[in-house]
Amino acid sequence: MLAAMGQAQQQGASAGLPSLKMLVIFALGAIFMRAAGCAINDFADRKVDGHVTRTKGRPLADGRLSAKEAIAAFLVLVLLSASLLFFLPIAVFYWSLGAVLLAFIYPFMKRFTHLPQVFLAAAFGWAIPMAYVAIQGAPDIWCWLLFVAYIV
């Protein structure tokens, strides 16, 4: 009976709640990567934002920030996020490359598709497979169902 309970506890991404360490790492990673996404988004839209009432006051659009500074901010935020990977299994590093790719391409998808929000949701939701890898070593069907549900 106890063996069955122990086996049941090991099922799922964290068998309940994640550790405080994992929670802090992934929360900081989300903050840094969302900020990086904002920086690269503003860079991609820098020539358009100045002509749109809602976005003309953004630092890049109104000249308070240069394009080089926006790229530097993106890189610094990505590096801060990447520094968190030192506290996670090495496999998470490889999965994190998907997050960087999605965060980088999202702003440019506005030019190629009518559904750039799908890429934005995928970029934000990529933490789901990363968390599965960090906690149980690999994503499973529940991971991918949760990821797709997040995107939808």
Image (cartoon, helix red, strand yellow):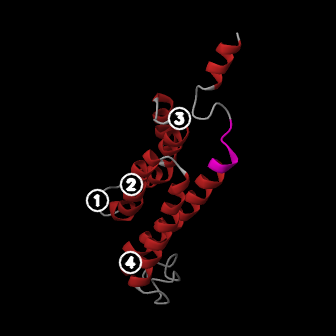
Local packing at callout 4 (Cα closer than 10 Å; few below 14, some 14-19, many 20+) is: few
Labels 1 and 3: the sequence-earlier one: 1
Q: Distance of mark 2 from mark 1, alpha carbons?
A: 22 Å
Helix, strand or loop under label 2: helix
- Provide the residue span drawn in magenta: 17-22
Q: Which residue is mark 1?
A: 112
Q: Residue at x 50, y 77 (%)?
A: 55
Labels 2 and 1 touching (C-beta < 8 A):
no
Q: Distance of mark 1 from mark 4, alpha carbons?
A: 16 Å
Q: Residue at x 52, y 56 (%)?
A: 86
- Vertical order, 80 against 129 (above or below): below
Labels 2 and 1: the sequence-earlier one: 2
Q: Distance of mark 1 from mark 3, alpha carbons?
A: 36 Å
Labels 2 and 3: the sequence-earlier one: 2
Disc 3 marks a residue whose amino acid type is Gln
Labels 2 and 4 touching (C-beta < 8 A):
no
Residue extending farthest to the left is 112
Q: Which residue is mark 3?
A: 136
Question: Where residue 68 sits: x, y (%)?
Answer: 39, 83
Helix, strand or loop under label 3: helix
Q: Which residue is mark 4?
A: 48
- Vertical order, 105 against 122 (above or below): below
Disc 4 marks a residue whose amino acid type is Val
Frontmost of labels 4 and 3 is 3
Confirm whether the magenta stretch covers residue 35. Answer: no
Q: Nearer the viewer, residue 122 or 23?
A: 23
Question: Where residue 14 sits: x, y (%)?
Answer: 61, 35
Labels 1 and 4 touching (C-beta < 8 A):
no
Q: Which residue is mark 2?
A: 97
Confirm whether the magenta stretch covers residue 19. Answer: yes
Disc 2 marks a residue whose amino acid type is Leu
